[in-house]
Image (spheres, grey):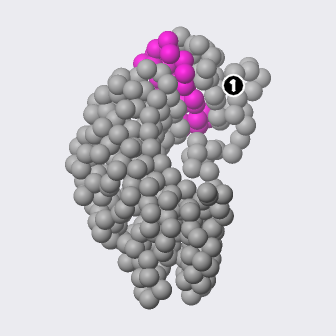
Amino acid sequence: MIKRQLIYYLCFLWLFVSCDTYTTFYSKTHSEINSDKFSKIHRLDLSNQNFRELPVSIVKVKDLRMVNLSNNPNLNIDKSLNQLATHKNLEVLILDSLGIKTIPESIKLFPNLKQISLVNNPGLNLQQILTEISELPIEFLNLKNNQLTKIPENITALNTLRDLNLSYNKIHDEASYSYLGQLPKLYSLWIDHNKLEQLPNTIGQLNQIRFFYVDHNYLKGLSDQLLEMKNVWVIHAGYNKFKEFPSVFSSMKSLLMVHINNNEIVSIPEVYETEKYSLAGLILDNNPLSYEEIIKAKKTFKGFFLLSFEQKSYK
């Protein structure tokens, strides 16, 4: 019982922890290089500064761990990476909104690179990029908003990958999810805002993940394929088209928390009154549940560590 309560508590904390993994290093983020602070800069944000090339003084910075080069559309990426090559401890590289199609081989100059962001670079040659970073210890890859429709098979080479953000794409391809299922350490997957009307039949192959984000899609139901996701703890399924709370959650043995707010749910299946299940936290905010249905649900889920039915007005 104590172990389960601890897991519940940890999941509760997760609700309030930002998914912005770029905050790995808890120190001030600098937006310019000041000569009297070379030894103090660990986080450097050079985004939105219209650079064509990086300041020469960047080689004098000591112990740089994170650098953000985003939204400098005329920046020479290969030259910039070579300028940064002295920073062997670099772990976080943010290359958002740069019009990137490919990544130069110079990316391999950073043997400790764990996080890379390529948000808003439509037209990415993802197969080439995955090949270039395959030998790096990448743990977090952000591919948000790139008009992706498929994930190439060579993503399976990223055997250290823990967190993958595929938000704001259109990945409906079944093979793509089969490849993701082969990533042994994948912990969190974002496929929100992918215009999914149903989950692909291969979704159950993602049986290694713990946190699953499918919110802001067009889902009306969830198939029994989710039962194969035997390790998932938390599912975010808000802002979809559900009219009934999915019964499949009652059979997911590791599932602890579900966010299914802002749907069209009007009823809770009776299976939750009769079956034993691990689910112990539920966010049902802004669903058109009747007063009677809410009272019934509160009795059904009375042992939950977190239960919310906050409602907006429905006419």
Q: Position of residue 220 (x, y in %)?
A: 38, 58
Magenta stretch: residue 190 in it? no
Residue type indicated by callout 1: Ser
* Residue drawn where x is 77% and y is 23% of the image: 36
Q: Quadrant of residue 261?
A: bottom right
* Residue drawn where x is 47% and y is 21% of the image: 98
Between 136 and 286, the residue placed more toward the observer is 286
Magenta stretch: residue 72 in it? yes
Q: Quadrant of residue 306?
A: bottom right
Q: Position of residue 179 (x, y in %)?
A: 26, 50
Q: Which span is picked out in magenta?
A: 62-90
* Residue drawn where x is 37% and y is 32% of the image: 147
Q: Quadrant of residue 71?
A: top right
Between 75 and 119, the residue placed more toward the observer is 119
Q: Quadrant of the C terminus?
A: bottom right
Between 182 and 177, the residue placed more toward the observer is 177
Residue 137 shows in this picture: no
* Residue drawn where x is 57% and y is 29% of the image: 68
Q: Position of residue 213 (x, y in %)?
A: 46, 54
Between 247 and 74, the residue placed more toward the observer is 247
**In screen coordinates, is 199 left or right of 313?**
left
Q: Secondary structure at mark 1?
A: loop
Q: How many marks?
A: 1
Q: Residues within 10 Å of mark 1 (few under 14, many from 20)?
A: some
**In screen coordinates, is 123 left or right of 47?**
left
The residue to which callout 1 is attached is 31
Above or below, 313 against 65 in this view is: below
Above or below, 172 against 116 in this view is: below
